[in-house]
Amino acid sequence: MAEANDSEETGLDDWAAALAEQEAFDAAQQPSDGGDALAAAPAAAAQIFQQFGEGAPPAGAPSNLDMILDIPVALTVELGRTKIAIRSLLQLAQGSVVELDGLAGEPMDVLVNGCLIAQGEVVVVNDKFGIRLTDIITPAERIRRLHK
């Protein structure tokens, strides 16, 4: 129990020190000519915080896009979907046919991490299946679909 009290007192001491430091800073920022304290705030902030918009990034620093180019994502091509009861699922055997909601010849959905990004059609190249993208969803459309 004494340990809990010690940590609480330390936490309160930290808060008291932080509040005292803030009060000292606020007092130092008060204009001596009786001007508006709010007008001095942006100038004080400019002195404290680094300006991110100024200058070029340091040499050798990666661009923002380069940092994420090697992150793996899950790409899924979806033929269609269906809902079936567990009873029907347990009765499936080799050769069973499951009816999907997608129509034959209809474009398939291409999803990245579960988010629709394009539609396409199946192609066969060197005995391997692939997909030819026929319609790419615009970023604005993707955002609009997220808010549905």
Image: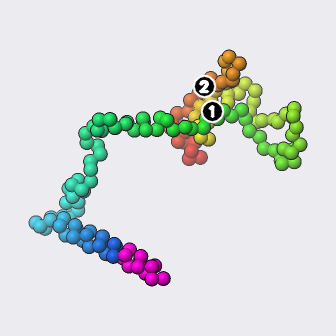
Which amino acid is tagged 2?
A: Leu
In the displayed structure, does residue 6 sit left or right of residue 42?
A: right
Q: Is residue 42 visible?
A: no
Which comes sooner in the sequence, label 2 or label 1? 1
Callout 1: few (<14), some (14-19), or many (20+) C-alpha neighbours within 10 Å? many
Label 2: element kind: strand
- Colouring mode (rainbow / by chain / secondary structure / one colour): rainbow
Alpha-carbon span between mark 2 and mark 1: 8 Å
Name above or below for residue 69 compared with residue 87: above
Q: Is residue 47 visible?
A: yes
- Place of residue 102 in the rendered image (x, y in percent of width and height, measured from the top left): 74, 33
Considering every residue shown, the one lying at the far front of the view is 3
Q: Residue 28 occupies which quadrant of the picture?
A: bottom left
* Residue lying farthest to the left in this orientation: 33
Q: Is residue 136 located in the magenta-colored stretch of the structure?
A: no
* Figure quadrant of residue 146: top right
Task: List the residue tagged with mark 1.
Answer: 110
- Image x and y of residue 40, in percent: 19, 60
Secondary structure category for the residue under label 1: strand
103 or 16: nearer the eye?
Answer: 16
Dot 1 amino acid type: Val
* Residue wearing tag 2: 133
**Most prominent secondary structure in the magenta stretch?**
helix
Mark 2 in CB contact with mark 1 (< 8 angstroms): yes
> Relative to residue 98, is residue 46 drawn left or right?
left
Is 118 placed left or right of 84 in the picture?
left
Q: Quadrant of residue 44?
A: bottom left
Q: Which residues are magenta?
A: 1-12
Q: Is residue 9 magenta?
A: yes
Residue at image coords 69%, 34%:
78
Residue 97, x across and y down, in percent: 85, 33
Rate crowding at label 2 as few (under 14), some (14 to 19) or many (20 or more) other CA atoms within 10 Å: some
